[in-house]
Image: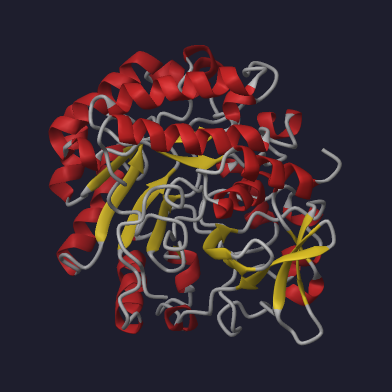
Amino acid sequence: MDSRTALVEDLMERFPHVPREAVFKEDLLRGGVAFDPSALSDTTNEAAGEVKPKSYFIFSFDHGTLPELGEAALRRPPEEIILTGGPYDLRRTVVSVRVNPASPYRVAAREDGVLGLYLDGRRIADVGVPPMPEYYRHKLSNGKSVMEVAPTIQWGYLIYLTAFRVCQYFGAKEECQYCDINHNWRQHKAAGRPYTGVKDVDEVLEALEIIDRYDTARISTAYTLTGGAITSKVQGLDEADFYGRYAKAIEEHFPGRWIGKVVAQALPKPDVQRFKDYGVQIYHPNFEVWDEYLFKMYCPGKERYVGRDEWHKRILDSTEVFGARNVIPNFVAGVEMAEPFGFKTVDEAIASTTEGLRFFMSHGITPRFTTWCPEPTTPLGRTNPDGAPLEYHIRLLQAYRQTMEDFGLSSPPGYGPPGAGNAVFSVSSFMDSLPADAPVEV
Protein backbone atom coordinates (compact mmCIF):
# COMPACT_ATOMS: atom_id res chain seq x y z
CA MET A 1 0.00 0.00 0.00
CA ASP A 2 1.18 3.51 -0.80
CA SER A 3 -0.05 4.95 2.49
CA ARG A 4 -1.34 3.88 5.88
CA THR A 5 -4.73 5.30 4.92
CA ALA A 6 -4.87 3.00 1.91
CA LEU A 7 -3.95 -0.01 4.07
CA VAL A 8 -6.61 0.77 6.67
CA GLU A 9 -9.32 1.37 4.07
CA ASP A 10 -8.41 -1.83 2.25
CA LEU A 11 -8.81 -3.83 5.46
CA MET A 12 -12.11 -2.16 6.27
CA GLU A 13 -13.37 -3.13 2.84
CA ARG A 14 -12.07 -6.71 3.06
CA PHE A 15 -13.39 -7.33 6.57
CA PRO A 16 -16.70 -5.43 6.72
CA HIS A 17 -17.94 -7.41 9.73
CA VAL A 18 -15.12 -5.98 11.88
CA PRO A 19 -16.17 -2.52 13.13
CA ARG A 20 -14.24 0.26 11.41
CA GLU A 21 -13.58 1.70 14.87
CA ALA A 22 -11.71 -1.48 15.79
CA VAL A 23 -9.50 -1.25 12.70
CA PHE A 24 -8.23 2.19 13.71
CA LYS A 25 -8.01 1.21 17.37
CA GLU A 26 -5.87 -1.85 16.66
CA ASP A 27 -3.57 0.18 14.43
CA LEU A 28 -3.10 2.78 17.16
CA LEU A 29 -2.47 0.09 19.78
CA ARG A 30 0.02 -1.87 17.69
CA GLY A 31 1.92 1.14 16.34
CA GLY A 32 1.35 3.98 18.78
CA VAL A 33 0.47 7.62 18.29
CA ALA A 34 2.47 10.84 18.24
CA PHE A 35 1.44 13.96 20.14
CA ASP A 36 1.93 17.46 18.83
CA PRO A 37 2.98 19.84 21.63
CA SER A 38 -0.39 21.54 21.16
CA ALA A 39 -2.06 18.33 22.38
CA LEU A 40 -0.07 18.02 25.60
CA SER A 41 -1.22 19.61 28.83
CA ASP A 42 0.86 20.93 31.70
CA THR A 43 1.34 18.02 34.07
CA THR A 44 4.20 19.38 36.14
CA ASN A 45 1.75 19.09 38.99
CA GLU A 46 0.01 15.94 37.84
CA ALA A 47 -3.04 16.46 40.09
CA ALA A 48 -3.69 20.09 39.13
CA GLY A 49 -4.37 19.86 35.41
CA GLU A 50 -7.63 19.37 33.57
CA VAL A 51 -6.61 16.18 31.74
CA LYS A 52 -6.07 12.79 33.35
CA PRO A 53 -2.41 11.91 32.61
CA LYS A 54 -0.92 8.60 31.63
CA SER A 55 -0.11 6.66 34.80
CA TYR A 56 2.17 3.90 33.48
CA PHE A 57 0.10 1.51 35.57
CA ILE A 58 2.23 -1.60 34.93
CA PHE A 59 4.12 -1.61 31.58
CA SER A 60 5.41 1.36 29.62
CA PHE A 61 3.16 0.69 26.61
CA ASP A 62 5.38 3.11 24.65
CA HIS A 63 7.51 2.76 21.53
CA GLY A 64 10.44 4.52 23.15
CA THR A 65 12.07 4.95 26.52
CA LEU A 66 11.18 8.05 28.53
CA PRO A 67 14.30 9.94 27.33
CA GLU A 68 13.30 9.16 23.72
CA LEU A 69 9.74 10.50 24.00
CA GLY A 70 10.76 14.16 24.09
CA GLU A 71 8.10 16.55 25.33
CA ALA A 72 5.65 13.67 25.82
CA ALA A 73 7.86 12.49 28.68
CA LEU A 74 8.00 15.92 30.34
CA ARG A 75 4.33 16.77 29.77
CA ARG A 76 2.48 13.51 30.13
CA PRO A 77 0.00 12.59 27.44
CA PRO A 78 -3.49 11.50 28.48
CA GLU A 79 -4.14 8.04 29.86
CA GLU A 80 -6.50 7.34 26.98
CA ILE A 81 -8.17 9.10 24.11
CA ILE A 82 -11.67 8.87 22.66
CA LEU A 83 -12.19 8.91 18.89
CA THR A 84 -15.46 10.10 17.36
CA GLY A 85 -16.81 11.39 14.06
CA GLY A 86 -14.58 12.38 11.17
CA PRO A 87 -14.87 11.15 7.57
CA TYR A 88 -15.42 7.56 8.80
CA ASP A 89 -18.19 8.63 11.21
CA LEU A 90 -16.53 6.79 14.08
CA ARG A 91 -18.57 5.82 17.08
CA ARG A 92 -17.13 6.55 20.54
CA THR A 93 -13.91 4.51 20.76
CA VAL A 94 -11.68 4.43 23.85
CA VAL A 95 -8.00 3.83 23.04
CA SER A 96 -5.13 3.36 25.49
CA VAL A 97 -2.32 5.80 24.71
CA ARG A 98 0.92 4.26 23.47
CA VAL A 99 3.36 7.00 22.56
CA ASN A 100 5.40 6.72 19.36
CA PRO A 101 6.93 9.98 18.05
CA ALA A 102 7.45 8.28 14.66
CA SER A 103 3.85 7.12 14.25
CA PRO A 104 1.90 8.19 11.13
CA TYR A 105 -0.97 8.96 13.53
CA ARG A 106 -0.73 12.31 15.31
CA VAL A 107 -2.94 14.06 17.83
CA ALA A 108 -2.89 17.83 17.38
CA ALA A 109 -5.05 20.83 18.17
CA ARG A 110 -6.62 23.11 15.57
CA GLU A 111 -6.41 26.86 15.93
CA ASP A 112 -9.62 26.77 17.97
CA GLY A 113 -7.98 24.30 20.39
CA VAL A 114 -10.12 21.31 19.42
CA LEU A 115 -8.06 18.10 19.30
CA GLY A 116 -8.10 15.79 16.33
CA LEU A 117 -6.43 12.61 15.12
CA TYR A 118 -4.50 13.04 11.86
CA LEU A 119 -3.33 10.31 9.49
CA ASP A 120 -1.29 11.03 6.37
CA GLY A 121 -1.94 14.71 7.03
CA ARG A 122 -5.75 14.34 7.06
CA ARG A 123 -7.96 14.82 10.10
CA ILE A 124 -9.76 11.50 10.54
CA ALA A 125 -11.46 11.88 13.94
CA ASP A 126 -12.22 14.22 16.77
CA VAL A 127 -10.26 13.41 19.91
CA GLY A 128 -11.58 13.56 23.44
CA VAL A 129 -9.34 13.30 26.49
CA PRO A 130 -10.29 12.06 29.95
CA PRO A 131 -11.03 14.81 32.45
CA MET A 132 -9.00 14.87 35.63
CA PRO A 133 -11.06 12.91 38.15
CA GLU A 134 -11.73 14.66 41.42
CA TYR A 135 -10.17 11.81 43.38
CA TYR A 136 -6.81 12.42 41.65
CA ARG A 137 -6.72 15.91 43.18
CA HIS A 138 -6.54 14.54 46.74
CA LYS A 139 -3.42 13.02 48.25
CA LEU A 140 -2.98 10.31 50.83
CA SER A 141 -2.03 11.33 54.34
CA ASN A 142 1.63 10.49 53.58
CA GLY A 143 1.62 12.76 50.52
CA LYS A 144 1.42 10.03 47.87
CA SER A 145 -0.93 10.58 44.95
CA VAL A 146 -3.96 8.43 44.25
CA MET A 147 -2.66 8.07 40.69
CA GLU A 148 0.50 6.42 42.01
CA VAL A 149 -1.26 4.02 44.38
CA ALA A 150 -4.57 3.29 42.63
CA PRO A 151 -4.73 4.65 39.07
CA THR A 152 -7.89 4.18 37.04
CA ILE A 153 -8.06 3.19 33.38
CA GLN A 154 -10.75 2.24 30.85
CA TRP A 155 -12.25 5.71 31.18
CA GLY A 156 -12.50 5.30 34.95
CA TYR A 157 -14.17 1.87 34.90
CA LEU A 158 -11.20 -0.07 36.33
CA ILE A 159 -8.94 0.64 39.32
CA TYR A 160 -5.57 -0.88 38.50
CA LEU A 161 -3.67 -2.01 41.60
CA THR A 162 -0.16 -3.09 40.63
CA ALA A 163 0.77 -4.31 44.09
CA PHE A 164 4.24 -5.59 43.08
CA ARG A 165 5.95 -3.48 40.45
CA VAL A 166 8.69 -5.92 39.47
CA CYS A 167 8.73 -9.57 38.43
CA GLN A 168 10.75 -12.42 39.94
CA TYR A 169 11.15 -13.92 36.49
CA PHE A 170 14.30 -11.92 35.99
CA GLY A 171 16.96 -11.78 33.28
CA ALA A 172 17.17 -13.09 29.74
CA LYS A 173 16.62 -16.73 30.75
CA GLU A 174 13.39 -16.08 32.68
CA GLU A 175 11.67 -12.83 31.63
CA CYS A 176 8.85 -13.07 29.11
CA GLN A 177 10.41 -11.79 25.92
CA TYR A 178 7.72 -9.17 25.22
CA CYS A 179 7.37 -7.82 28.77
CA ASP A 180 8.99 -4.61 30.07
CA ILE A 181 7.63 -4.57 33.63
CA ASN A 182 11.13 -4.63 35.14
CA HIS A 183 12.50 -2.00 32.76
CA ASN A 184 9.47 0.21 33.35
CA TRP A 185 10.21 0.11 37.07
CA ARG A 186 13.85 1.02 36.43
CA GLN A 187 13.11 3.90 34.04
CA HIS A 188 10.65 5.58 36.38
CA LYS A 189 13.04 5.30 39.30
CA ALA A 190 15.88 6.68 37.14
CA ALA A 191 13.66 9.63 36.14
CA GLY A 192 12.93 10.39 39.77
CA ARG A 193 9.25 9.64 39.43
CA PRO A 194 7.33 8.09 42.33
CA TYR A 195 6.91 4.42 41.56
CA THR A 196 6.29 2.30 44.66
CA GLY A 197 7.75 -1.22 44.39
CA VAL A 198 5.47 -2.97 46.87
CA LYS A 199 2.28 -1.13 47.71
CA ASP A 200 1.27 -1.00 51.34
CA VAL A 201 -2.18 -2.46 52.05
CA ASP A 202 -3.18 0.51 54.19
CA GLU A 203 -2.12 2.93 51.42
CA VAL A 204 -4.28 1.04 48.94
CA LEU A 205 -7.24 1.21 51.30
CA GLU A 206 -6.73 4.94 51.85
CA ALA A 207 -6.56 5.55 48.09
CA LEU A 208 -9.72 3.53 47.57
CA GLU A 209 -11.45 5.50 50.30
CA ILE A 210 -10.65 8.70 48.40
CA ILE A 211 -11.92 7.19 45.14
CA ASP A 212 -15.08 5.94 46.81
CA ARG A 213 -15.71 9.33 48.42
CA TYR A 214 -15.30 11.42 45.28
CA ASP A 215 -16.48 9.00 42.59
CA THR A 216 -20.06 10.00 43.28
CA ALA A 217 -21.23 8.83 39.85
CA ARG A 218 -19.92 5.33 40.62
CA ILE A 219 -17.99 5.16 37.35
CA SER A 220 -15.34 2.92 38.91
CA THR A 221 -16.84 -0.56 38.87
CA ALA A 222 -13.98 -3.03 39.19
CA TYR A 223 -10.45 -3.35 40.52
CA THR A 224 -7.61 -5.52 39.29
CA LEU A 225 -4.89 -6.82 41.60
CA THR A 226 -1.74 -7.66 39.73
CA GLY A 227 2.01 -7.28 39.43
CA GLY A 228 5.04 -9.38 38.72
CA ALA A 229 5.15 -13.13 39.17
CA ILE A 230 6.31 -14.37 42.58
CA THR A 231 8.41 -17.51 42.41
CA SER A 232 9.64 -17.44 46.00
CA LYS A 233 8.26 -14.97 48.54
CA VAL A 234 7.56 -11.23 48.88
CA GLN A 235 7.37 -9.95 52.44
CA GLY A 236 7.32 -13.58 53.53
CA LEU A 237 4.25 -14.41 51.43
CA ASP A 238 3.73 -16.62 48.40
CA GLU A 239 1.82 -15.33 45.37
CA ALA A 240 -1.68 -16.34 46.48
CA ASP A 241 -1.31 -14.86 49.96
CA PHE A 242 0.57 -11.75 48.79
CA TYR A 243 -2.06 -10.65 46.28
CA GLY A 244 -4.92 -12.21 48.17
CA ARG A 245 -4.35 -10.10 51.29
CA TYR A 246 -5.22 -6.95 49.31
CA ALA A 247 -8.51 -8.49 48.17
CA LYS A 248 -9.31 -9.55 51.72
CA ALA A 249 -8.72 -6.03 53.05
CA ILE A 250 -10.66 -4.39 50.22
CA GLU A 251 -13.66 -6.69 50.58
CA GLU A 252 -13.72 -6.19 54.36
CA HIS A 253 -13.62 -2.39 54.05
CA PHE A 254 -15.73 -1.98 50.89
CA PRO A 255 -18.01 -5.04 50.69
CA GLY A 256 -19.58 -5.29 47.26
CA ARG A 257 -18.35 -1.87 46.08
CA TRP A 258 -16.24 -3.19 43.19
CA ILE A 259 -15.85 -6.37 41.16
CA GLY A 260 -12.59 -7.88 42.43
CA LYS A 261 -10.20 -9.37 39.87
CA VAL A 262 -6.69 -10.80 40.17
CA VAL A 263 -4.09 -11.33 37.44
CA ALA A 264 -1.64 -13.98 38.63
CA GLN A 265 0.16 -17.06 37.47
CA ALA A 266 -1.73 -20.27 36.85
CA LEU A 267 -1.48 -21.58 40.39
CA PRO A 268 -2.37 -24.97 41.90
CA LYS A 269 -6.01 -25.42 42.81
CA PRO A 270 -5.54 -24.94 46.60
CA ASP A 271 -3.87 -21.56 45.95
CA VAL A 272 -6.66 -20.57 43.56
CA GLN A 273 -9.16 -21.47 46.30
CA ARG A 274 -7.39 -19.02 48.61
CA PHE A 275 -7.96 -16.24 46.07
CA LYS A 276 -11.64 -17.10 46.11
CA ASP A 277 -11.71 -17.23 49.91
CA TYR A 278 -10.06 -13.80 50.06
CA GLY A 279 -12.93 -12.35 48.06
CA VAL A 280 -11.62 -12.34 44.47
CA GLN A 281 -14.43 -12.81 41.96
CA ILE A 282 -12.55 -13.11 38.64
CA TYR A 283 -9.26 -14.92 38.02
CA HIS A 284 -6.93 -14.10 35.12
CA PRO A 285 -4.24 -16.82 34.79
CA ASN A 286 -2.79 -15.50 31.53
CA PHE A 287 -1.66 -18.08 28.98
CA GLU A 288 0.28 -15.43 26.95
CA VAL A 289 0.72 -17.32 23.66
CA TRP A 290 -0.87 -20.58 22.53
CA ASP A 291 1.74 -22.30 20.38
CA GLU A 292 3.80 -24.80 22.37
CA TYR A 293 7.16 -23.88 20.88
CA LEU A 294 6.54 -20.12 21.12
CA PHE A 295 5.47 -20.44 24.75
CA LYS A 296 8.80 -22.10 25.55
CA MET A 297 10.78 -19.50 23.61
CA TYR A 298 8.90 -16.38 24.69
CA CYS A 299 7.95 -17.33 28.27
CA PRO A 300 11.08 -19.16 29.47
CA GLY A 301 10.47 -18.51 33.17
CA LYS A 302 6.91 -19.79 33.04
CA GLU A 303 8.05 -22.82 31.08
CA ARG A 304 10.81 -23.52 33.59
CA TYR A 305 8.79 -23.09 36.77
CA VAL A 306 5.42 -24.45 35.64
CA GLY A 307 5.44 -25.63 32.02
CA ARG A 308 2.85 -25.04 29.34
CA ASP A 309 0.85 -28.25 29.80
CA GLU A 310 0.66 -27.81 33.56
CA TRP A 311 -0.23 -24.13 33.06
CA HIS A 312 -3.20 -25.09 30.91
CA LYS A 313 -4.25 -27.86 33.32
CA ARG A 314 -4.27 -25.34 36.17
CA ILE A 315 -6.42 -22.95 34.14
CA LEU A 316 -8.98 -25.71 33.62
CA ASP A 317 -8.79 -26.73 37.28
CA SER A 318 -9.46 -23.15 38.36
CA THR A 319 -12.91 -23.30 36.76
CA GLU A 320 -13.92 -25.70 39.55
CA VAL A 321 -13.26 -22.85 42.00
CA PHE A 322 -14.43 -19.76 40.13
CA GLY A 323 -16.71 -21.21 37.48
CA ALA A 324 -15.67 -21.17 33.83
CA ARG A 325 -17.20 -17.76 33.12
CA ASN A 326 -15.06 -16.11 35.81
CA VAL A 327 -11.75 -17.56 34.58
CA ILE A 328 -10.49 -15.18 31.89
CA PRO A 329 -6.88 -15.81 30.74
CA ASN A 330 -5.20 -13.14 28.63
CA PHE A 331 -2.91 -13.63 25.67
CA VAL A 332 -0.62 -11.10 24.01
CA ALA A 333 -2.01 -10.75 20.51
CA GLY A 334 0.71 -10.33 17.90
CA VAL A 335 3.71 -12.07 19.45
CA GLU A 336 2.72 -15.14 17.43
CA MET A 337 4.30 -13.39 14.44
CA ALA A 338 7.39 -12.04 16.20
CA GLU A 339 10.78 -12.87 14.72
CA PRO A 340 12.89 -14.89 14.99
CA PHE A 341 10.65 -17.79 16.03
CA GLY A 342 7.13 -16.65 15.18
CA PHE A 343 4.86 -17.64 12.33
CA LYS A 344 5.78 -16.22 8.95
CA THR A 345 2.26 -15.79 7.61
CA VAL A 346 -0.96 -14.34 8.99
CA ASP A 347 -2.78 -17.55 8.01
CA GLU A 348 -0.50 -19.67 10.23
CA ALA A 349 -0.69 -17.28 13.17
CA ILE A 350 -4.49 -17.03 13.07
CA ALA A 351 -4.82 -20.81 12.78
CA SER A 352 -2.65 -21.33 15.86
CA THR A 353 -4.37 -18.69 17.98
CA THR A 354 -7.82 -19.91 16.94
CA GLU A 355 -6.81 -23.41 18.04
CA GLY A 356 -6.11 -21.96 21.49
CA LEU A 357 -9.37 -20.05 21.54
CA ARG A 358 -11.30 -23.19 20.64
CA PHE A 359 -9.51 -25.18 23.33
CA PHE A 360 -10.48 -22.79 26.11
CA MET A 361 -13.91 -21.84 24.79
CA SER A 362 -14.84 -25.52 24.45
CA HIS A 363 -14.48 -25.62 28.24
CA GLY A 364 -16.64 -22.51 28.70
CA ILE A 365 -13.62 -20.26 29.33
CA THR A 366 -13.58 -16.93 27.47
CA PRO A 367 -10.01 -15.66 27.04
CA ARG A 368 -9.35 -12.02 26.27
CA PHE A 369 -6.31 -10.37 24.74
CA THR A 370 -4.07 -7.35 24.92
CA THR A 371 -2.74 -5.96 21.64
CA TRP A 372 1.02 -6.37 21.67
CA CYS A 373 3.00 -3.15 21.96
CA PRO A 374 6.63 -3.84 20.91
CA GLU A 375 8.38 -1.94 23.69
CA PRO A 376 11.98 -1.27 22.60
CA THR A 377 13.70 -2.52 25.76
CA THR A 378 12.31 -6.05 25.31
CA PRO A 379 13.96 -8.71 23.12
CA LEU A 380 10.91 -9.03 20.85
CA GLY A 381 10.42 -5.28 20.73
CA ARG A 382 13.99 -4.73 19.58
CA THR A 383 13.75 -7.27 16.78
CA ASN A 384 10.15 -6.41 15.81
CA PRO A 385 9.74 -2.64 16.17
CA ASP A 386 6.69 -2.62 13.89
CA GLY A 387 4.91 -5.42 15.75
CA ALA A 388 2.56 -7.76 13.92
CA PRO A 389 0.83 -6.82 10.65
CA LEU A 390 -2.45 -4.96 11.07
CA GLU A 391 -4.16 -7.66 9.03
CA TYR A 392 -3.34 -10.19 11.76
CA HIS A 393 -5.11 -8.08 14.38
CA ILE A 394 -8.19 -7.55 12.22
CA ARG A 395 -8.51 -11.21 11.35
CA LEU A 396 -8.04 -12.11 15.02
CA LEU A 397 -11.06 -9.98 15.92
CA GLN A 398 -13.05 -11.83 13.28
CA ALA A 399 -11.86 -15.25 14.49
CA TYR A 400 -12.44 -14.36 18.14
CA ARG A 401 -16.05 -13.34 17.63
CA GLN A 402 -16.76 -16.34 15.40
CA THR A 403 -15.32 -18.76 17.96
CA MET A 404 -17.41 -17.21 20.73
CA GLU A 405 -20.51 -17.64 18.59
CA ASP A 406 -19.56 -21.24 17.79
CA PHE A 407 -19.55 -22.09 21.50
CA GLY A 408 -22.49 -19.90 22.48
CA LEU A 409 -20.47 -17.61 24.75
CA SER A 410 -21.04 -13.95 25.54
CA SER A 411 -18.72 -11.13 26.58
CA PRO A 412 -16.86 -11.86 29.83
CA PRO A 413 -17.80 -10.14 33.10
CA GLY A 414 -15.75 -7.32 34.57
CA TYR A 415 -14.95 -5.56 31.28
CA GLY A 416 -17.77 -3.11 30.98
CA PRO A 417 -20.22 -2.99 28.08
CA PRO A 418 -19.49 -4.66 24.72
CA GLY A 419 -20.06 -3.26 21.28
CA ALA A 420 -18.64 -0.53 19.07
CA GLY A 421 -19.53 2.83 20.56
CA ASN A 422 -20.06 1.28 24.00
CA ALA A 423 -16.83 -0.48 24.99
CA VAL A 424 -14.41 1.04 27.49
CA PHE A 425 -11.76 -1.71 27.49
CA SER A 426 -8.85 0.20 26.04
CA VAL A 427 -5.88 -2.14 25.40
CA SER A 428 -7.49 -4.20 22.64
CA SER A 429 -10.63 -4.09 20.52
CA PHE A 430 -12.12 -7.41 21.51
CA MET A 431 -14.95 -5.76 23.45
CA ASP A 432 -15.56 -3.24 20.63
CA SER A 433 -15.98 -6.12 18.20
CA LEU A 434 -18.59 -8.09 20.15
CA PRO A 435 -22.34 -7.54 19.83
CA ALA A 436 -23.69 -4.70 21.94
CA ASP A 437 -25.96 -5.67 24.80
CA ALA A 438 -27.76 -2.34 24.84
CA PRO A 439 -26.99 1.32 24.11
CA VAL A 440 -24.89 3.06 26.74
CA GLU A 441 -25.54 6.64 27.77
CA VAL A 442 -22.42 8.81 27.42
Q: Residue at x 35, y 83 (%)?
A: 214
In the figure, is residue 305 to the left or right of 74?
Answer: left
Picture quarter containing residue 384?
Answer: top right
Q: Residue at x 36, y 69 (%)?
A: 440
- Residue 357 screen position, x and y as percent: 38, 27
In the figure, is residue 170 to the left or right of 413?
Answer: right
Depth check: 194 or 70 in front?
A: 70
Q: Residue at x 27, y 30 (%)?
A: 407
| Quadrant (top left, top right, bottom left, bottom right) of the N terminus | top right
In this rendering, is residue 74 above or below 248? below
- Residue 378 screen position, x and y as percent: 67, 34
Q: Is residue 145 among what the camera can see?
A: yes
Picture quarter containing residue 268?
Answer: top left
Depth check: 266 or 421 in front?
A: 421
- Residue 412 screen position, x and y as percent: 30, 46
| Quadrant (top left, top right, bottom left, bottom right) of the C terminus | bottom left
Counting every numbered tag in the picture gives 0
Type of colouring: secondary structure
Depth check: 70 or 126 in front?
A: 126
Q: Residue at x 55, y 50 (%)?
A: 22
Q: Is residue 330 among what the camera can see?
A: no
In this rendering, is residue 89 above or below 165? below
- Residue 52 screen position, x and y as percent: 56, 74
Picture quarter containing residue 13?
Answer: top right
